[in-house]
Image (spheres, helix red, strand yellow):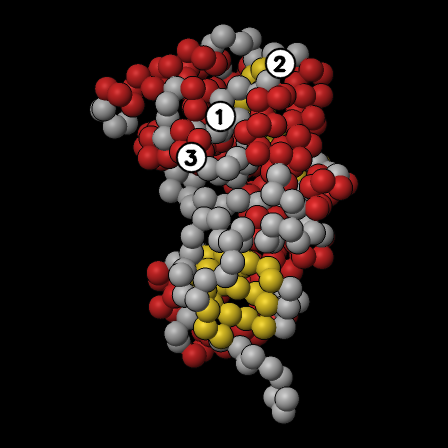
Amino acid sequence: MNDSTGLIEKKRKAISLLRKHRGVLVALSGGVDSATLLAIACEALGNENVLAVTGRSESVTDEEISDAASVAGGLHVRHEIVETRELDRPAYRANAGDRCFHCRSELFTVLAEIASSRGLDAIAYGAIVDDLGDDRPGMDAARQFGIIAPLLEAGISKSDVRVLANSLNVHVHDKPASPCLASRIPVGVEVTPERLGQVRRAEAALRDVGFSIYRVRHHGEIARLELGELESRRIEDPRVRERVVAAVKRAGFRFVVVDLEGYRLGGASSAAGALYSIAPARESGQ
């Protein structure tokens, strides 16, 4: 592991915070933050006193579920996948800017029932210090439900997490951030299974083409692609472009455009940046 005294002390603090509890349920997504938390919880309490639980719904990709299961399996810790029903909550579907609060509230309600039935006295999630600078309604839900955030309390950042994950042999240590599919739908537009399905199929198509850094933002009939630097270069190849257009249209969109500002976090909540079309703006003959 990185021999930085500061990072070692941060990890020790996280372990100390976890050891205040007899047993911990860790909310495990497929990302690096919660995976690192799970590894540290196992070190702090022993695998037998830790339970990893992953929520599955229409807004979570199969890849996230698979990554979560792989992380738990690699750490030899108990893992359960549970169904969450945030789409049954009108406030979640309304997508009024506090969608994450209602999503987390649904998840934590389910997790609280599991923790109680298993005799676990704490639920932990993978919030880190980088999350403090953003508008994070989900963190408000965590506070209301009494969910602990050992990485955040220990002052651990995203760069710290990646170093720790690598040292703990967590295979998702270099995985890009992957928010839920609902984050691709602009604020104010209702979250529906149909829209989530379109995004899911379109992003799966990009992955099949070989892209790794991307988002498909949902704008009605338009799919706005945010691409990483390498992907932006690849899309200039007419053969690749043709495959992408065809695949994204099959996912349920009529038009496909690329955002010239490229891949960035929070790209769905703001207006689209500069665009150029990679599919006809209107059908032939119109």
Which residue matches tag 2? 120
| Separation (CA) of disc 2 from disc 1 | 15 Å
Q: Secondary structure at mark 3?
A: helix
Which residue matches tag 3? 133
The amino acid marked with disc number 1 is Leu
Q: Residue at x 51, y 58 (%)?
A: 271
Q: Secondary structure at mark 1?
A: helix
Contact (Cβ within 8 Å) of mark 2 with mark 1 = no
User: In the displayed structure, does residue 50 sit left or right of residue 108?
Assistant: left
User: In the displayed structure, does residue 2 sit left or right of residue 260?
Assistant: left
Mark 1 and mark 3 lie on one chain; the one further toward the N terminus is 1
In the depicted structure, whether residue 153 falls above or below residue 90 = above
Neighbor class of circle 1 (other Cα within 10 Å; few <14, some 14-19, many 20+) is many
The amino acid marked with disc number 2 is Leu
Q: Secondary structure at mark 2?
A: loop
Of the numbered discs in the image, which one, if any, rests on residue 169? Answer: none
The amino acid marked with disc number 3 is Gly
